[in-house]
Image: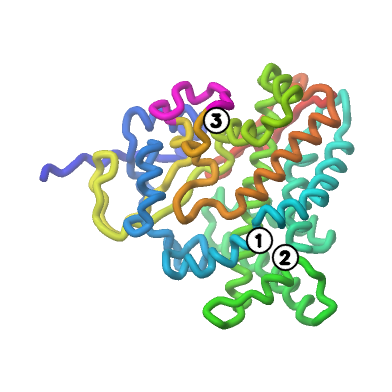
Amino acid sequence: MKKTQRTEWDPRSPEVLSDQVAAYDEMRARCPVAHSPYGNWTAFRHEDVVGILEDHETYSNVVSHHASVPNGMDPPEHTRYRQIVDRYYTPERMAAFEPVCRQITRELVAALPRENDVEIMSDLAEPFANRVQCAFMGWPDRLHDPLRQWTRKNHEATLAMDREAMSAVALEFDGYIREQLDERRAAGTDAPADTTTALLRETVGGRPLTDEEIVSIVRNWTVGELGTIAASVGIMAEFLATHPHVQQQLREQPADLERASDEILRINAPLIANRRRTTRAVTLGGQEIPAGERVMVLWASANRDERVFGNPDEFRLDRDPAQNLLYGTGIHYCPGAPLARLELRLVLEELFAGTTAIEPAEGARPVRAQYPGSGFSRLPLRIR
């Protein structure tokens, strides 16, 4: 067999970082699977990404030396833990949590200054993600500021690819979770009836979950919530400000808000990529990839594939929702999707209820988040 030519690309190069979306669009057309200097293969096309996600036997989720429950597991181990996780995102739980989530959203929107520029990321998106996650877990308000500082340190360490700093940040976060577990054990029967207490009572294979397993589950939930939900809120707010006709359409048709959030985040992904590892040699997008190689599924490209979506920048509410990979597909489909959709719908509802217009700021410009982050690091807008 003729050996294919390996194509290199650097997701951290200045050319890519100057306009990530344009770079992904260009690579998708020119070279749908490419190798990077960091040892990863990247899949850009929708078809290839779906093939990877639906073939968990060939593309393993065990990609790290550190335990990740259940995200970093394959069946049958993944199946046992995923059954536990899914119980926390049922329609009944979401309905019970909605009033709490709405109150948090309403308070934050009401506090935004009117007629002046507002920094949406620091004034709405980040505190929203922080407060909602703490409320969902049953954590006290005193954790709001430490978790917000932790999120920034985690982002800085990841951006710098500083493994020592990333390990220290991870250890700090684990300490917050263990403190909450210890408090509930000490309270005994008086422990609050919340998500954290419920996790302490879960079993797998006839035994209680270990602290390490609970910490890993909660870490996956919380890191995704604090980063991705904040990015999602910023992306939606910026899109509405720069597409006033869509904003007006959604103000008049509130029943479309959930589909609208999915579509806006298809156009501009809040999460750039996830990793897989090949368990056997494969040919993907014309590239021969050996066993044991890391493969990145690039959501930010696959969800803009012209072969599936036509004009990727066109906002449409009549698309097939099954083609939108915002929450993934296959056995690792995001378990927290029901909570994310609830949160994002409520943000839109309360923004529309509490304002008459969301507009670009006068003078100041948004600052894009840097890879591997997405969305905006600064987003000045004007609220009326």
Q: Left or right of 383: which side holds 320?
A: left
Quadrant for the C terminus in the image: top right
The numbered mark, 1 or 2, whose residue comes first in the sequence reads 1
Q: Residue at x 71, y 39 (%)?
A: 345
Q: Secondary structure at mark 3?
A: helix
Judged by depth in the image, the label closer to the viewer, 1 or 3, is 1
Q: Are marks 2 and 3 in contact (CB under 8 Å)?
A: no
**Residue that badge 2 annotates:** 195
Nearest the camera: 257 or 371?
257
Residue under circle 3? 267
Residue sticking out furthest to the front: 92
Q: Is residue 316 magenta?
A: yes
**Residue 171 lies in magenta, yes or no?**
no
Image quadrant for the N terminus?
top left
Q: Residue at x 65, y 56 (%)?
A: 90
Please rate how many residues cluster around mark 2, counting C-alpha atoms within 10 Å: few if below 14, some from 14 to 19, many from 20: some
Nearer-N-terminus badge (2/3): 2
Residue in view at x 46 percent, y 27 percent:
309
The answer to which image quadrant residue 10 occupies is top left
Q: Provide the residue designation for mark 1.
A: 88
Residue 364 visible in the shown view: no
Labelled pair 1, 2 in contact (Cβ < 8 Å): yes
